[in-house]
Amino acid sequence: MPFVENQGAKIYWDDQGQGPPVLLIMGLGYTSCMWHRVRPVLAQRYRTLAFDNRGVGLSEVPPGPYSIVTMAADAAAVLDAAGVASAHVFGISMGGMIAQEFALQFPARTRSLILGCTSPGGSSGVRADSKVIDIRLVRGMTPEQARTAILPYIYDESTPHALISEDIDLRRN
């Protein structure tokens, strides 16, 4: 398994496919395996590089908190380890915030920026709906109850339950 050391943490990464490189940055608390639907399609035409953000999955969990700036540097370290000078950068949710910071820190390494369900953060950022915040603050919920309560805010109501179950199973492993 490939790892790269950056600022006190071993970061897990891997690559699939061939072609122009695409760096995949996942959101808060999700591992790189959550690209499981998009990545096979991209890997048919692109070299996809995915990694587990520090504190998640196979990457180390150094003392926090982790800044977006540090996590953008982790993304650059992944490109270095892969021998890639520049890539298309695709970030989802918090990964989109990391991708934006990456583009600011490393403009010459950013071929394009693809952002999904994210914001710029800071004073310009759109805060989560109060109902989502309320779910996170409810005490006494089991992990299963919390997962169930947040699902309507993660998935469209038309999403087949089998796909949701598949994602939940992936996150548990």
Image: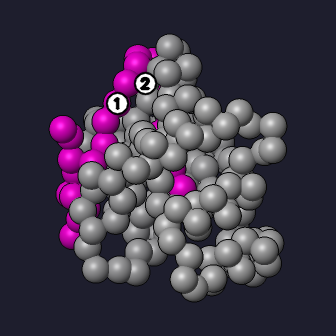
> Relative to 87, does residue 20 appear above or below in the rendering?
above
Q: Looking at the rendering, in which quadrant would you find the N terminus?
A: top left
Q: Residue at x 55, y 29 (%)?
A: 37
Judge whether residue 123 can be spotted in this image: yes
User: Residue at 43% across / 24% down in the picture?
Assistant: 47
**Percent position (x, y) of residue 159?**
74, 37
Kindly indicate the quadrant of the structure image that contains residue 65.
bottom left
Identify the element where label 2 is drawn: strand
Q: Residue at x 50, y 14 (%)?
A: 44
- The percent coordinates of residue 3 (x first, y second) are 21, 47
In front: 124, or 51? 51
Query: What residue sits right under mark 1 in the picture?
Result: 15
Q: Amino acid at mark 2?
A: Arg
Task: Determine which of the numbered discs, if any, sits on residue 47 in the image.
Answer: 2
**How many residues crowd around disc 2 within 10 Å: few (fewer than 14), some, or many (20 or more)?**
some
Q: Any magenta on residue 25?
A: yes
Q: What type is the residue that disc 1 sits on?
A: Asp
Q: How many marks?
A: 2
Q: Residue 168 location, x and y as percent?
A: 51, 46
Whether residue 59 sits left or right of residue 65 in the image: it is left
Please state the extent of the stretch shown in magenta in the rendering: 1-27
- Looking at marks 2 and 1 on the same chain, the residue that comes earlier in the sequence is marked by 1
